[in-house]
Amino acid sequence: MSLRLYDTGTRSVRDFQPRKTDEVGVYLCGLTVQGPPHIGHLRSGVSYDLLIRWLRRSGYNVNYVRNVTDIDDKILVRGAEQGRPWWAIAYENERKLAEGYDALNVEAPTYEPRATGHITQMIDLIQSLLERGHAYATEAGDVWFSVSSWPDYGELSHRRPEDMLSGAEPGNKRDSRDFGLWKAHKPGEPLDAAWTSPWGPGRPGWHIECSAMARRYLGDAFDIHGGGTDIMFPHHENELAQSRGAGLDFAKYWVHNGMLNLAGTKMSKSLGNTLSVSALGEKGFSPAAIRYYLTSVHYRSAVDFSEDALGEAQSAWERLSNFVRRAAEALGLESTIGGMMCADFVNAMDDDLNTPAAVAAIHDMAREGNAALDAGDDTAATNIAGGVRAMLDQLGLDPFDAHWDDPSDAKLTGAVDALVQIALEQRAEARARKDYAAADRIRDELTQAGVTVKDTPRGPVWTVD
RNA sequence: GGUGGGUUGGCCGAGUGGUUAGGCAGCGGCCUGCAAAGCCGUCCACACGGGUUCGACUCCCGUACCCACCUCCA
């Protein structure tokens, strides 16, 4: 079996067959960096990270492009509000986004282009749309895409023009459905937010950016285009129309991830109901647990975020993590490397990235592994532990991944280790003479200091909370 | 109003026309000096009403409720 993916364009799960045998081009609409990222954005990052990792493990050489939109109306508004250059705000948020991705172990894309670096490519595309009669320029210096000139408009989101509510953005356009390709510079807007063009100074419309950047780095035709369901219309519909209108084949498959809701409503910048990774960290949730949480639901499902659910996910994640650590302590870390993923896991991933089922397969194996360790069956335990680690690693959740280490802890560990060892030796002596009151007192004191001690057949093990 | 998605056991969350999802929490047991971890067992289910079928949570129709998009938004 091989990968099957849900394709929004056909509204069905399709066998994934890239244009070239062993290469895959993927374009993901990244963020408009008008504010710091929240976990809804990061959910999208994790979802596509899982896809990319699975494509790579399936043998494809993946060219993964995820853009940053660093110029738009709201960024200019933020700049005016804060009395700072708009580009400083965009870049600040872009860095925070990168930190968020990194915290959740989301791998960097092959390339991360910025919209402002591709104005000439956008102008080229707009010109070819004008030449082909799919766009028109106004005296004010705006350029609009003519929706009525493109009969296939609506093919992605399956909307009919007559079904659409009126009240689209105002402007000097001929048809209310037409969307902006180029926005003329307006009085009062910063001069450094305008570029010269055949139609006068201005800046690009949102949609044209992605068409131009996808074309530059992935070519006129590529395999997968992704983003959140909230931008399927109009953004992706518009991208598709203008790229096809310019004579490009564009994307073969369209993938959309579901929204992350808070109290039943979409988490969004405009609603202000956002939650950041660092805020969750302050509440005691680890980045690995957050990633596990986002991985344990299907990427197309809406997720109603709750701290209770995240707490349950953290417990579940610790169960897997505990098994891997336990196995490494018993068998040696080397023994847990290079295992095989089980068939249930592979089949689940091939089935439109059914990560909840994949995670369930890991839990099943972890149970068997724990039983093998209990029984002293090191051969079986080694095989299972290696498989569990391989699968967790595939999901970006290997407990031993250095990514999860907190560098600030590293210095302390050495010092604490020496101190804890002294205490544990005293406790061992107390236990040897069956003075359990004294032994428990030492353990309680360590617990109060944040050091959790547990006894295993191979002696005590401690962790810092 | 249009389009799409959803409603699963105390909670999270997959899936299937007839056979245990998985996890968290609870309960009982084993193990342990105790605890933790782990293992075994166990309780709890498919919004509502019709229909198709030998049999439906799983297909069809209807009803209710929820969400998203139709305007910037992953």
Image (tube, grey):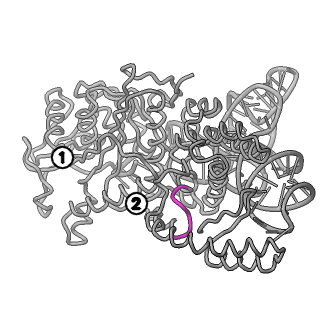
Q: Is residue A287 left or right of residue A109?
A: right
Q: Which residues are magenta?
A: A282-288
Q: Is residue A49 left or right of residue A129?
A: right
**Residue that appears at 35% across and 60% down:** A96
For the N terminus of chain A, the image quarter is top right
The amino acid type found where label 2 is placed reads Lys
The numbered mark at residue A117 is 1
Picture coordinates of residue A321, whole percent (x, y):
62, 52
For the C terminus of chain A, the image quarter is bottom right
As drawn, A143 above or below B59: below
Which quarter of the figure has residue A20? top left
Q: Is residue A167 left or right of residue A52?
A: left
Picture coordinates of residue A220, whole percent (x, y):
26, 27
For marks 1 and 2, the one nearer the N-term is 1
The numbered mark at residue A269 is 2
Depth check: give the residue in front, A125 or A226: A226
Q: Is A283 contained in the magenta span?
A: yes
Mark 1 or 2: the one toward you: 1
How crowded pointer 1 is (Cα within 10 Å; few <14, some 14-19, many 20+) is rated as: few
Q: Is residue A159 visible?
A: no
As drawn, A432 above or below A117: below
As drawn, A156 above or below A400: above
